Image (cartoon, rainbow, N blue to C red):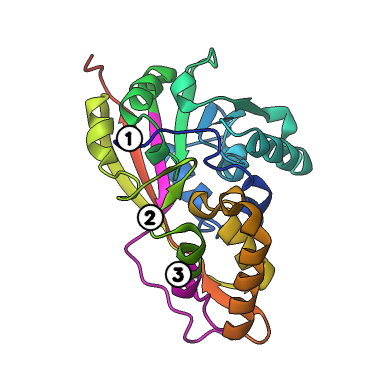
Amino acid sequence: MVAGWEWDETLFAGTAAHYRRGRLPYAPGLADVLAEALRLDGRGRLVDVGCGPGILALTLAHLFSEVVGVDPDREMIAEARREAAEGGVAGKARWVRARAEELPADLGEFTVATFGQSFHWMDRERVAATTWGMLRPGGSLVHISDLKSETLTVDDLPHPAVPGAAIEELIRRYLGPVRRAGRGVLPRGTPDGEAAVLARAGFTGPQRHVAPGGQPLERTADDVVAGVFSMSFSAPHLFGTRRDDFEADLRRLLRDASASERFSERRPSTEIFVWGRGPSLR
């Protein structure tokens, strides 16, 4: 966890309704890459820690006999449960409202534990050690995120790019220059260095895989607005009584950037680090 910052329940407050529409999807080959890397065959159990509205857990649900999503946000859990029902997998999906630090929470033993761009919000040393104990021998912890090092352009696509820099500047105008996170701030951003944390917990590896992105996407202004409101640093509640003013300015910015209010983007590649449950170091 970041020094000087404490998690609170408002971190993602109000973002769940915007998440699925606003966030760019994982690369389409993610499930196939993971199935091959871990030899998944529809058996075993998955726990997705920091599951949000269930996007990752439901993407991988067909690879397991049961999936369990864990998240502290009530609205995220409700969205995940609704999506599971609509997707016809409610019978094999369980959703638990809890912080990662409250695990194992009598959830049993798992084949795979996934962290989809969530590990940095946690007490990583504690959660890594607990997760090690929740995995069966030979199990895996999988850390999944967008590939940050790639550069994706929209030069050959039909619509302008999303004006990301202008949106960031507008957020700063309303919320100040320091990144917001719940009731606190993150002047240095979220931590990295998860490899050292996981190695100390007894995990071996990692094996690195990439599910290639680059597929073109068309995004409407509504999609982009949802994306902004899905982020912890621009969650709707942070704007207080100025939320409507911010959204009006954001939509004006988007109209100026694209008269059709349509934008082109590309899916990011998905980076996958697989850590094995090695011998205990404790």
Amino acid type of the residue that numbered disc 3 sits on in the rendered structure: Glu
In this rendering, the answer to whether 92 lies above or below 18 is above
Percent coordinates x, y for residue 91 in the rendering: 73, 28
Percent coordinates x, y for residue 105 in the rendering: 52, 15
- Gap between marks 3 and 1 measured at Cα: 38 Å
- SS assignment at label 2: loop
User: Residue shown at 57%/83% (left/top)?
Assistant: 257
Closest to the camera, between mark 3 and mark 1, is 3
**Residue, disc 1:** 275
Q: Nearer the viewer, residue 101 or 177?
A: 177
User: Residue shown at 58%/39% (left/top)?
Assistant: 57
**Residue, disc 3:** 169
* Residue range (magenta): 140-168
Percent coordinates x, y for residue 56 in the rendering: 55, 44
Question: Could you tell whether 125 is left or right of 30 in the image?
Answer: left
User: Residue shown at 61%/41% (left/top)?
Assistant: 54
Amino acid type of the residue that numbered disc 1 sits on in the rendered structure: Trp
Instruction: Give residue 27's mark.
Output: none
